[in-house]
Amino acid sequence: MPRLVLEALMSAETELFDLELKILLEAVYLRYHYDFRHYAVSSLRRRMRHAMGRYGLERLSDLQHRVIHDPAFFAEAMQYFTVQVSEMFRDPAYFAALREHAIPVLKTYPSIKVWIAGCSTGEEVWSMAILLEEEGLLDRAVIYATDINPAALEAAESGVFALDRMALFCRNYQAAGGRRSLSDYFTTGYGGAVFDRRLKKQVVFADHSLATDAVFSEVHLVSCRNVLIYFNRELQDRAVGLFHDSLVRRGFLGLGAKESLQFGAHAEAFEACAPQQRLYRRAAT
């Protein structure tokens, strides 16, 4: 088949897939009030194709039918709408930057609030709790850990991670400036590494959507990493606006390694604190 004809067919197929994707996301929003309509299309395409393969469905419209008519199926398929990939102390330089730049400031407050937005299965929540514990801040901190995926929140709260991931987590922890051995914080059980329950005594796990929900608290640090890359520009601006409105004056915002405030609607509202590690502070004005 000539290359131009093949490209035209592929383009038409993609257009049709995107049309069905738009209908699916609108249906999910109307049926369940989960709003994925402003998520990045390229990522959603890939994840929906994975879902179709997983469930043996030929067309996206087949997935839509099952999602709309079977809430239990939608709950299971949520894993394909959201991305649940993380590590403890992921990007160790980021946590080292928190120790160097944010912690000394946070120590000046009598109490602090931290928001882990899009906490997924909790790796960053437990990392943050350990960091605050080692800096003597955990007892006077509240960590809000939020996500839209109920199954992810349940996993996050359990604090149980696969043993075969612990070697990586331990390396990350040491590279991030860990003061002890990560193994001091967990025991083995339930088929995995079970982190010390004491670490989550100051953590509040809650459902919150960056696409539809409002500010719920005033916080000193927002850490939202590797989430914005799955949003389009409009939703990125909404999320960063929420973070700005949530932060106290001169509060800190941490993003993922591939995320930046540059070119966004709120670029002027923040100052780079550790630019290589994507750590920012709310501007004074």
Image (cartoon, rainbow, N blue to C red):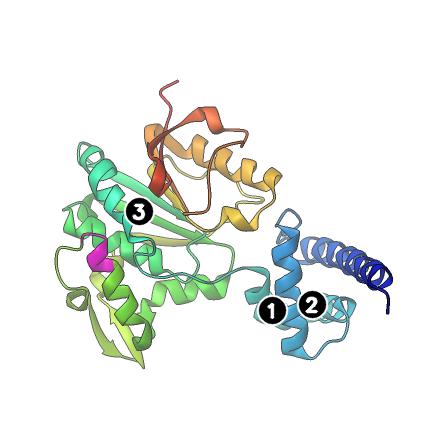
Q: Nearer the viewer, residue 190 or 46?
A: 46
Distance from the alpha carbon under mark 2 to that under mark 3? 38 Å
- Relative image position of residue 245 (x, y in whole percent): 45, 31
Q: First in sequence: mark 2 or mark 3?
A: 2
Q: Which residue is mark 2?
A: 67
Q: Which region is colored magenta?
A: 173-177
- How many tags in the picture? 3
Precedes in sequence: disc 3 or disc 1: 1
Which numbered dot is residue 94? 3
Please state the horizontal and vertical placement of residue 246, each as a whole percent of the image: 41, 34
Classify mark 3: helix, strand or loop: helix
Q: Amino acid at mark 3?
A: Tyr
Residue at the extreme front of the image, as rendered: 2
Question: Viewed as shown, does residue 132 lie left or right of 263?
Answer: left
Is disc 1 surrounded by few (<14), some (14 to 19) or many (20+) residues within 10 Å? some
Which secondary structure dominates the residues rendered in magenta? helix
Amino acid type of the residue that numbered disc 1 sits on in the rendered structure: Ala
Look at label 2 and name its amino acid. Val
Please name the residue shown 14% across and 64% down the image: 181
Vertically, is 258 above or below 156? above
- Please name the residue that numbered disc 1 is placed on: 77
- Which badge, 2 or 1, comes first in the chain's sequence? 2
For marks 3 and 1, give the CA distance.
32 Å
Task: Identify the secondary structure beneath mark 2.
Answer: helix
